[in-house]
Amino acid sequence: MEAQMNLPPKQAPPERMTLEEFLQWTDEDVWAEWIEGEVRFLSPVSDQHADLNDFLRSILRMFVERHRAGIVRGEPFVVRLPVLNVVYSPDVFFLSESRRHLMRTTYLDGAPDLVAEIVRPESQLRDTQEKLQNYQKAGVCEYWLIDPAEQVMRVYTLGEDGLYHPLQPDSEGRYHSTVLSGFWVRESWLWQRPLPDLLDVAEQWSILRREV
């Protein structure tokens, strides 16, 4: 039997925290978000969630670094959305090179270009409603929602009207990013077990050719 771990989370101060207090208090051992003064602890994730998170961050980072396009980060690194007075910890996000000046030592001070959230049972409403609306208001240009339980991927892009519009996959089931030229994800990759080999993905993007 697996040992049960009942370690308590790092406790927040008894009263509401200011943004400055939260950013000073949180560290790499704390997985939390800040919503208008209240601290929201995030629960541990499943093995499948962690595997998908690592895969998405790895392929996105591989592509971004190959093209020197910007920065890829993810939880527990946090993102401050100033217009909404919230701090989120996205599973994965991309910040374009031209907006690198928004990076701070321990957080991103502004909206990323692309955010990907992997839905957990307890976060479904938060990810599909609250965060979708808030990322839209904050100006996140592209929002990826990945639901392992339903094996569904949804991509939303920000239109000129300031609203999210669903992005449709191509005939081969590939979602092509609108903020990162040339980057795409085949939805079927996400449900494979094991997940695709990173070098195989790079070959499909034609950014790497293996020697025979």
Image (tube, rainbow, N blue to C red):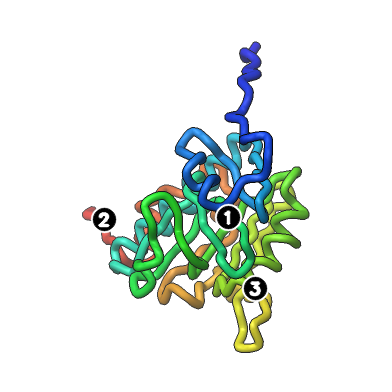
Disc 1/disc 2 C-alpha distance (Å): 42 Å
Q: Pinpoint residue 22: horizontal percent, then vertical percent.
A: 55, 46
Dot 3 amino acid type = Lys
Label 1 crowd (10 A; few <14 / some 14-19 / many >=20): many
Label 2 crowd (10 A; few <14 / some 14-19 / many >=20): few
Q: Residue furthest bottom?
A: 160
Looking at the image, which residue is at 68% across and 47% down? 38
Looking at the image, which residue is at 73% across and 54% down? 126
Looking at the image, which residue is at 45% across and 63% down? 94
The residue that label 3 is drawn on is 137
| Residue 98, picture quadrant | bottom left
The residue that label 1 is drawn on is 87
The answer to whether residue 6 is above or below residue 50 is: above
The numbered dot on residue 23 is none
The residue that label 2 is drawn on is 210
In the depicted view, which residue is nearer to us: 177 or 13? 13
In the depicted view, which residue is nearer to us: 186 or 135? 135
Mark sitting earlier along the chain (3/2): 3
Q: Pinpoint residue 145: horizontal percent, then vertical percent.
A: 64, 60
| Residue 43, picture quadrant | top right
Dot 2 amino acid type = Arg
In the depicted view, which residue is nearer to us: 1 or 204? 1
**Kind of element beneath mark 2:** loop
Q: Nearer the viewer, mark 3 or mark 2?
A: 3
Residue 171 visible in the picture? no
Answer with left or right where residue 82 lies relative to residue 108: right
Dot 1 amino acid type = Val
Q: Badges 1 and 2: C-beta atoms under 8 Å apart?
A: no
